[in-house]
Image: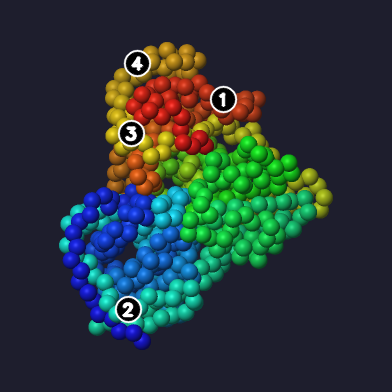
């Protein structure tokens, strides 16, 4: 048993350590500056009450991106010096963000210990590698992201930090080998428990879904399936779940070997970056001629998802609405009913229509999964989702990419339970179009302008706020752009008062609300590592089932034209086109 002592290291504040909606994300070259990671970790320990640190059990793992292994060793040493009793690490440092949440909530150590929180090392869907992005965030004992009260304290601490503590004499722990390493400090014992990354998560998924019925679907010769891990941490779960548990062929898995640089790709499951899957599913510039019936992808840390049918894309906003509409019948976990549902404000109102039909309470929250967590902890929300490819439920306190894939496989299995012996299968496209026929269609698109000069981005947002002083002038401008677009009925900056703790979140996005239920929403994203990302959301609701079959680009063209000219994005930023269109 190695012995260690506690070293106090003098430090000083480093500018720019304010956590965004999902932690602190910067370029690797920023994180590898002297004291940078150490300052943030110590500031986090200092933001927690002493009883939440001393003698605690913490999870430290992530999506395996470049610098993760070094960061894990640093955090282990700092945890020991700050009085943490034990650290749990997923084998090879790998745990998906949803798996971390599951481990915090569900895992019991051999000595009966339970986790008190977690450091998650991820920059989610952002690229990885020596010249790319790294990130860190802290999750609480409920398995969910730290609330603003904690992240604000962390940031304040980073601005005044003078020292941090780190263990001297504590060797690097072999995180490739499962087992417990024991160490001794001046006061107490300190352990590092390296455990299998997938077991706890797989056990949880099997308690939620009817795996035998999904296995029957996958075994049907009429059904074909493809999953793309984008070389993220989802690969640590895909083979275990889809191949070993559900019987899919290993050839149905794409890019499921986790890599520090995600294979040089951008691990974001959308139509722009998941090019190989998009082509395999018969879409994109070079579509395969014989695509499978169902396809899905997850992002770098496996909390986001994309769902595809044969030559058919399911929008994330439609996906959460369809899961909600079918959850009670298709997913055993929900068989006794749903408590309520929630969506982020920019997400389309497709979920609202389903909630109204099912007499469910609906909550509209700011972007950021932590807002759903409060509702779930209070028993108010069962299913929730974001337009940014995040879907989940109250089984954990993070969005969950593989959960969403299993939810869709469950719906397909339920819809086809009588068709597996030779009848024509109900397809993803059939399910979506039937949903539109029942509930109407929310035409929807999102324009992302990434790495925009921060000053120019602020000019755009200030301009949009100033316009809201006169609805009459807005409508006069719009009529000059496109006379066929209906008038704006209201405009505001979205503000949310949490019904559980009463906290208020202001300036959460600029909204223009039209008379027919259409919306334009503008917001700055907090998930980039440098510059600013302007996100523009455009939505039009059509109830008439004879008009739900148009191409989104055609249906939304007038509103897109209005949005671009009203916002003056080209004039302020110089950007003639978005980086990504979803």
Tally of numbered tags:
4
Question: Taking 210 as reference, is 499 left or right?
Answer: left
Residue 403: x and y in percent read: 55, 55
- Give the percent coordinates (x, y) of residue 414: 68, 51
Neighbours of disc 4 within 10 Å: few (<14), some (14-19), many (20+) = few
Q: Identify residue for label 3.
A: 457
- Residue 105 occupies which quadrant of the picture? bottom left
Residue 228 tag number: none
Mark 1 touches mark 4? (CB < 8 Å): no
Asked which secondary structure carries label 4, the reply is helix
| Residue 472, disc | 4
Q: CA distance from mark 3 to mark 1?
A: 28 Å
Q: Position of residue 264 (x, y in %)?
A: 51, 52
Query: How busy is the neighbourhood of tag 3: few (under 14 within 10 Å), some, or many (20 plus)?
Result: many
Which structural element holds mark 2? Answer: loop
- Residue 555 got which mark? 1
Of pointers 4 and 2, the one earlier in the residue sequence: 2
Identity of the residue drawn at 41% across and 81% down:
181
Sequence-first tag of 3 and 4: 3
Q: Nearer the viewer, mark 1 or mark 4?
A: 1
Between circles 2 and 1, the one closer to the viewer is 2
Instruction: Report, in whole angstroms, how far the alpha carbon at label 3 lies from the one at label 4.
Output: 25 Å
The numbered mark, 2 or 1, whose residue comes first in the sequence reads: 2
Mark found first going from the N terminus, 2 or 3: 2
Do the residues bearing badges 3 and 1 touch, measured as CB atoms within 8 Å? no
Image coords of residue 317 (percent x, y) = 52, 40
């Amino acid at each position: 048993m190695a012995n260690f002592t506690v070293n106090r290291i003098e430090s000083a504040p480093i500018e720019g350590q304010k956590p965004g909606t999902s932690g602190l994300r910067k370029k690797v070259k920023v994180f590898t500056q002297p004291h940078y990671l150490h300052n943030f970790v110590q500031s986090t320990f200092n933001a927690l009450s002493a009883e939440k640190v001393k003698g605690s059990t913490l999870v430290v793992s992530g999506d395996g991106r470049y610098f993760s292994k070094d960061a894990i060793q640093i955090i282990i040493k700092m945890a020991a010096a700050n009085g943490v009793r034990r650290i749990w690490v997923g084998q090879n440092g790998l745990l998906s963000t949803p798996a971390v949440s599951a481990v915090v909530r569900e895992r019991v150590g051999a000595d009966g210990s339970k986790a008190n929180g977690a450091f998650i090392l991820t920059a989610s869907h952002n690229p990885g590698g020596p010249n790319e992005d790294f990130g860190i965030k802290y999750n609480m004992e409920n398995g969910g992201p730290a609330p603003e009260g904690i992240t604000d304290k962390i940031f304040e601490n980073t601005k005044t930090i003078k020292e941090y503590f780190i263990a001297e004499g504590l060797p690097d722990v072999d995180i490739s080998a499962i087992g417990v390493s024991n160490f001794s400090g001046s006061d107490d014992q300190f352990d590092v428990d390296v455990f299998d990354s997938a077991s706890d998560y797989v056990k949880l998924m099997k308690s939620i879904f009817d795996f035998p019925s999904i296995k029957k679907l996958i075994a049907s010769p009429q059904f074909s399936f493809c999953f793309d891990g984008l070389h993220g941490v989802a690969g640590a779960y895909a083979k275990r779940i889809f191949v070993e548990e559900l019987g899919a062929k290993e050839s149905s898995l794409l890019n499921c070997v986790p890599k520090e640089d995600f294979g040089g790709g951008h691990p974001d499951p959308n139509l722009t970056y998941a090019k190989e899957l998009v082509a395999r599913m018969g879409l994109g510039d070079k579509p395969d001629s014989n695509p499978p019936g169902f396809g899905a992808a997850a992002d770098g840390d496996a909390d986001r998802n994309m769902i595809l049918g044969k030559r058919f894309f399911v929008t994330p906003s439609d996906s959460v609405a369809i899961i909600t509409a079918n959850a009670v019948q298709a997913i055993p976990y929900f068989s006794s009913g749903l408590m309520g549902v929630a969506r982020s404000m920019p997400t389309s109102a497709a979920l609202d229509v389903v909630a109204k039909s099912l007499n469910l309470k609906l909550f509209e929250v700011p972007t950021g999964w932590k807002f759903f967590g409060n509702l779930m902890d209070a028993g108010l929300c069962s299913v929730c989702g974001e337009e940014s490819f995040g879907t989940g439920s109250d089984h954990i306190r993070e969005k969950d990419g593989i959960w969403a894939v299993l939810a869709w496989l469950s719906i397909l299995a339920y819809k086809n339970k009588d068709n597996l012996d030779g009848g024509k299968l109900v397809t993803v496209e059939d399910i979506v179009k039937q949903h539109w026929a029942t509930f109407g269609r929310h035409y929807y698109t999102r324009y992302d302008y990434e790495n925009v000069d921060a000053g120019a981005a602020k000019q755009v947002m200030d301009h949009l706020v100033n316009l809201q002083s006169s609805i009459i002038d807005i409508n006069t401008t719009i009529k000059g752009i496109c006379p066929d677009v209906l008038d704006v009925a209201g405009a505001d900056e979205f503000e949310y008062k949490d019904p559980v703790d009463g906290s208020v979140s202001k300036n959460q996005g600029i909204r223009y609300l039209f008379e027919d239920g259409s919306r334009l929403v503008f917001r700055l994203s907090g998930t980039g590592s440098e510059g600013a990302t302007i996100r523009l959301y455009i939505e039009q609701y059509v109830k008439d089932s004879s008009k739900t079959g148009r191409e989104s680009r055609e249906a939304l063209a007038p509103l897109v034209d209005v949005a671009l000219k009203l916002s003056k994005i080209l004039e302020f930023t110089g950007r003639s086109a978005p980086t990504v269109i979803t």
